[in-house]
Amino acid sequence: MRNDVCQGDGRWVTGHAIAKDQTSVIGHSRRSEVGIGRSASEHSPAIRTSAVVSDASRRRQRVLPTRSGLSSHGHRATVERGTLVIRPSADELALSIAYNPMSKPQTNMMRRPSVIAGIAYVQLLTAVHILKAFDSPYINRVPLYIGSPLSVHAQWTYMASLLPVAVVVGVGLVHGKSWVRWILAATILATAAITIPVQNAQGIYSYVLALLIGSTILALLFLAPSARTYFAHPRAAKRSLSVRDLFARAMFAFCAVNTSFILADRFAGKVELATAIAVLAILSLPALVLGIVARWHITTACREAATVLLSTALFLACRFLLVATYVHVSNLTAFPEAMRIDSVILTSVIAVLGLLLSRLSVHRASRPQPLTASES
C-alpha cells in the first residue's frame, strides 16, 4: 500500500512530497491539522474522527490512501492548497445521516405543543356549547352565576359576548399568536370581577371552581416551557396545509364537538345511554379513525388523536363539576335535570383511550429508526 494522495488535477503526490511542503498535511507546527470538508463534517461525527489520526505529541499526522485515490476509510481524498480534504461518497453521507438523526436539516422541526392544541380544542368546545346554550328554555330565566350582582338578562348577554372571544382565542392559539393569551387572561379576570357572589354566599363554590379552571389554563399558556418556546418562535411552527391536513383537522374537530354534545346531553338526562353509545360508535369513532388515516404518519396521528380525546374529556370533566356544583347549591326546581353517572364513566373511557394513544406516540417517537435494506 502506497502512501500517496491524489490531487484535484489527477496527479499523485507522495507522502514525502507532502511532508516537505510547509503548508502540507504533515507539518512541524503545533497547529498542523488535517482539514476536513465542511460538507462532510456537518453530517457525521464518525467521518470527522476517522479522517484525523494524531500521535501523542500532536506533531505528526499520517493518512493512508490507496492507489484508487481513496483513504483507508474509503473517502475520496484530494489536496487543495496544501490541506487534505476528504469528501465522502453519497452512500456514506446517507449512512451517516441514518445513524445520526440530528444531522438532518432542521427545517420546520418545531411542532405545535399538545398543551396548546388541547387548550385550542377547549376554546372550540366552549364556543359551541355557549351557542347551544341559547337553544334552551332556560335562556334569560335561570341565572348563570349564582350570587352575581348582574341581572339574569345581563348574565346571559355577557355569556353571549364570550362566544367570539373563545373563537378568536382558539384560532389564535392554533396560529401561534401570543397576544391571544392576554385576551384570554383579560376575559378570565373580567369574568371573575363581575361574577363575585356578593348576593348569595352559596355561589362561592362555583365561583372558586371556575376561577381555578381559568387559572390553570393561564398557567399552562404562560408558564409551560413548550408553550413559551412555541410563542417565542411562532414562524418556526408554521407550515403549509394540504387538503389532507385540513380534512384531518376537520375530522378531529367533529369528533370533539360530537362527543362533547352527546355526553353532555347524557349527563343532563336528555338522551338514553344506548343512544349515546350508538352516536359515539357511529359518528365520533369513525371521525377519529378518518382523522388518523388522513394524517398517515402514525406517530403524529396518535399524538393528535390523543390530544383530541384528552382535551374533550377534560372539558367534559370541568363541565360536569360546574353543573353538579350549580345544581347542588341552586333551586332544583329551576334546573330539574337528573345527572347520569354513566356519562362520567364514558368520559373516563375516552380519557383512558387518549392516554393509551399518547403513550403509543411517545413510544414510537423514542424508538430508534432502523436502517432499510437500501441503506445497508
Image (cartoon, rainbow, N blue to C red):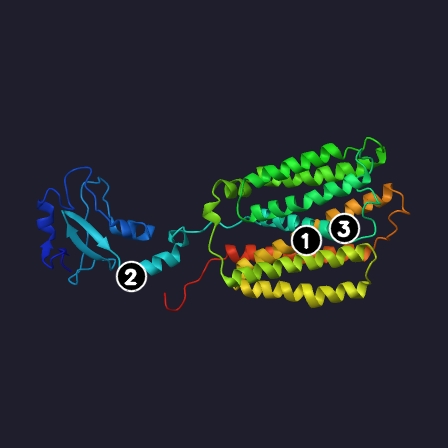
Residue name at image x 34 percent, y 57 percent: 96
Give how far across and how far down residue 268 sits, in percent.
Answer: 82, 54
Query: Which three-letter amino acid code belongs to the residue tagged 3?
Result: Phe
Of tags 2 and 3, the one toward the viewer is 3
Residue name at image x 65 percent, y 60 percent: 254
Give how far across and how far down residue 8 sits, in percent.
Answer: 14, 56
Give the residue furthest to the right.
Answer: 333
Residue identified by numbered label 1: 312
Query: Which three-letter amino acid code belongs to the residue tagged 1?
Result: Thr
Of tags 3 and 1, the one toward the viewer is 3
Query: Which three-letter amino acid code belongs to the residue tagged 2?
Result: Ala
Report the side of 4 relative to 239 (left or right): left
Compare marks 3 and 1 and give the one earlier in the sequence: 3
Can residue 297 be seen?
A: no
Mark 3 neighbour class, 10 Å CA radius: few under 14, some 14 to 19, many 20 or more = some
Q: Does residue 267 sit above or below 168 in this rendering?
A: below
Residue identified by numbered label 2: 90
Distance of label 2 from label 1 (alpha carbons):
48 Å
Distance of label 2 from label 3 (alpha carbons):
65 Å
Where is the N terminus found, in terms of image quarters?
bottom left
